[in-house]
Image (cartoon, rainbow, N blue to C red):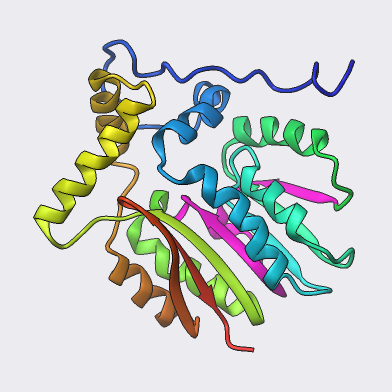
Amino acid sequence: MSKADSSPEQLTDRLFATERQPEDFRFDAAVARVFPDMIRRSVPGYTTIIPMIEVITEQYAQAGSNCYDLGCSLGASTLAMRHGISFDSCSLTGVDNSAAMIERCEHYIALDDHSLPVRLRCENIQETELENASVTTLNFTLQFIPPEQRSSLLSKIAEATRPGGVLILSEKIRFDSEDEQDIQTCLHHEFKRANGYSDLEISQKRSAIEQVLIPETLDAHKQRLEDAGFDRVLVWYQCFNFVSMLAIKAA
C-alpha cells in the first residue's frame, strides 16, 4: 500500500449541518475525521500560523533540548516544528488527551518524510512532564483548559523552558469593548460563511463550544505569561479575534 493510499480519510465538516440536541463540543472520533477541514474553515489565519510555527521553531530550537506540542490534535503544528528543528540532538513530543486525535496523528507523522523521531503521548497536558524545553507550542489549546488551571500550566512550561527558549501561544480572544467584540465576532462569522458554513452550522457550533472554549482578553494572556516567568510577550499574528503570541525567556 502506498503512503497516499494509507492516508487517513479527510471529510468535509458537516457535523452541525442539521438540527441536533445541544451538547458540549468534544474532540471525539467524529471531530477527528473532519478536523483538518473544520479548523481551516473556522479559524482565520490558521493556514498562515502553521507554516510560521516552522519558521519560529527554526529560529529558537536549541541543540540538546526538548520541544513540545501540547494539544497536538492531528499534528499539524507538530509537523511544522519537526521541519523547523535542525538539530538531531533535539527531541519532539506531541501530547493530546483525545485517543481519536492521537490515533490519526500517528498516521500523519508516519507519512511525513522528516527523519526526526516524534513521540506521541495520550494524556492531559496538565499532567505532562516537561523539562529542558527550547520551543513549546499551545496552538489553540489553552482556551480549552479551565481558566483556573491555566496559570499553573503556564508556570510549569516557563519553569521547564531554557534561557532563550519560547512558548508559541495561539488563542481565540475576547475584547473589553462590547462594540469591538461585536465587530470582531461579526467578521469571524462572515469568514465562516465565506468558507461554506450555514447560519445553522455557525449557531449550533457556537452553542456547543461556548461552555468548553473560554476566551480571555489579550491583556489577561500577556499578564499571565509574564507572571508565569516569561520575560517578553509579543503578538506576532492576529486576524479578527484570533491571535498568536510569542513568550520568550531571556537568554
- Which quadrant holds the C terminus? bottom right
Residue drawn at 25 percent across, 41 percent down: 187
Q: Does the magenta segment cover residue 48?
A: no
Left or right of 107, for residue 145: left
Q: Say whether residue 139 is visible.
A: yes
Q: Position of residue 106 (x, y in %)?
A: 74, 35
Q: Residue furthest bottom?
A: 251
Quarter occupied by residue 57: bottom right
Q: Position of residue 240 (x, y in %)?
A: 31, 50
Q: Position of residue 193 (x, y in %)?
A: 30, 26
Q: Residue furthest top?
A: 18
Quarter occupied by residue 73: top right
Vertical placement of 247 versus 239: above or below? Answer: below
**Magenta-highlighted residues:** 117-142
Residue drawn at 75 percent across, 31 percent down: 107
Q: Position of residue 81 (x, y in %)?
A: 70, 55
Vertical placement of 26 versus 5: above or below? Answer: below
Left or right of 144, for residue 220: left
Q: Does the magenta segment cover residue 139?
A: yes
Q: Say whether residue 71 is visible.
A: no
Left or right of 234, for residue 118: right
Left or right of 227, for residue 133: right
